[in-house]
Image (cartoon, helix red, strand yellow):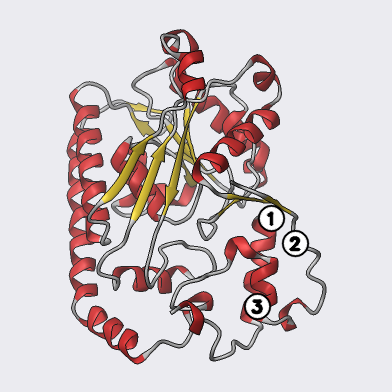
Amino acid sequence: MALDIAGAPPPGPDAADAPVEELDARYAPYARRDAYGVMGRGPLAPAEAARLAIAAAVLLPLRLVAGMLVVLLYYLVCRVCTLFAAADGGRPRLVGWRRRAVLRAGCSLSRAMLFVFGFYWIRETDKRLPSAEDVNQGRSEELGRPGAIVSNHVSYVDILYHMSASFPSFVAKESVSRLPLIGLISKCLGCIFVQRESKSSDSKGVSGAVTERVREVSQDKNTPMMLLFPEGTTTNGDYLLPFKTGAFLASAPVQPVILRYTYRRFSPAWDSMDGARHVFLLLCQFVNYMEVVRLPVYYPSEQEKEDPKLYANNVRKLISTEGNLILSNLGLADKRVYHAALNGSSLPDNRHQKDD
């Protein structure tokens, strides 16, 4: 059963001098519990260090090459499918065979990329809630198509899974649209591009763009569903942070999905580690595990439609209960404080011996 925990107390000027154990307890949703320790820099047993060295020499290069080939192949598919295609708001308007080709290739190649990352088997559960079925059975046509997938956020791998399962669009920085290879792919995904550093793209503007797209999805079956992570940042996978209301402002139904990553040595959760180190360690782990629980479509009540915050909180409680996740009041600002404090801490050599 999920429990509520209080938010972290103000860090104060001496946060960087606090013991690592105290920081982990205070910022529990971001604390790593795997064999690699704090920020992936903990001491390794000789056997683990040898295993990592062999993987870095053999497995890592193979996976990097395979991953690049997958990206290149999908880029070529997108390039062919967008030839002579009409543009709509800066993105290609894909219909008919073009959309089918991009969708099927995208799902298949996203699954192939997960395989490259070591996710050979993914355990998926379609969890049906009797109460939801009783209320909504036979009414999906009337109540509308889900406008967004809402999911807990644990790792960048989350996006690959959702692309392999339902090929949604998502919010990305405007600069992504200009990247080689990835730019065209993101346009075919139907991403919403925003300039986060610009005053014209503040939280209200982004929320407005998301709300407009969610409504568009519910009315046009050819518009890809939005993928939204209402927490706004990643955790270690055991906690669920407060939900932002952007996914719920349109009052459209949502599809809740729960992701969990089990592990023996390295956790795929991207919680308190820099990106390059995390990708390196993830690719050096021969097998990675993922569990997915897909809940029934959540149709908001009239009261929830009028109160997006209530809607968001109720969906959050549902995901927490069904995923056995602990509710936390921390947020992105607390995560930054935790990272800053860790970077200023001296880590004891025996920090994670009990977790090996």
What is the CA distance from the residue labelled 1 to the residue labelled 2? 7 Å
Residue 47 visible somewhere in the drawing: yes
The amino acid type found where label 3 is placed reads: Glu
The amino acid type found where label 2 is placed reads: Ala
Residue 213 relative to residue 125: left or right: right
Residue 287 relative to residue 232: left or right: left
Residue at 75% of width from left, 61% of height from top?
A: 8
Answer whether labels 1 and 2 touch (C-beta < 8 Å). Answer: yes
Residue of label 2: 8
Residue at 27% of width from left, 57% of height from top?
A: 119
Q: Earlier in the sequence, mark 1 or mark 3?
A: 3
Could you say where residue 164 lies in the image, as x and y percent from the top left?
A: 29, 42
Residue of label 3: 21
Q: Secondary structure at mark 3?
A: helix
What is the CA distance from the residue labelled 1 to the residue labelled 3? 18 Å
Asked if 98 appears above or below 351 in the picture, the reply is: above
Crowdedness of circle 2 by 10 Å Cα count: few (<14), some, many (20+)? some
Crowdedness of circle 3 by 10 Å Cα count: few (<14), some, many (20+)? some
The front one of 76 and 320 is 320
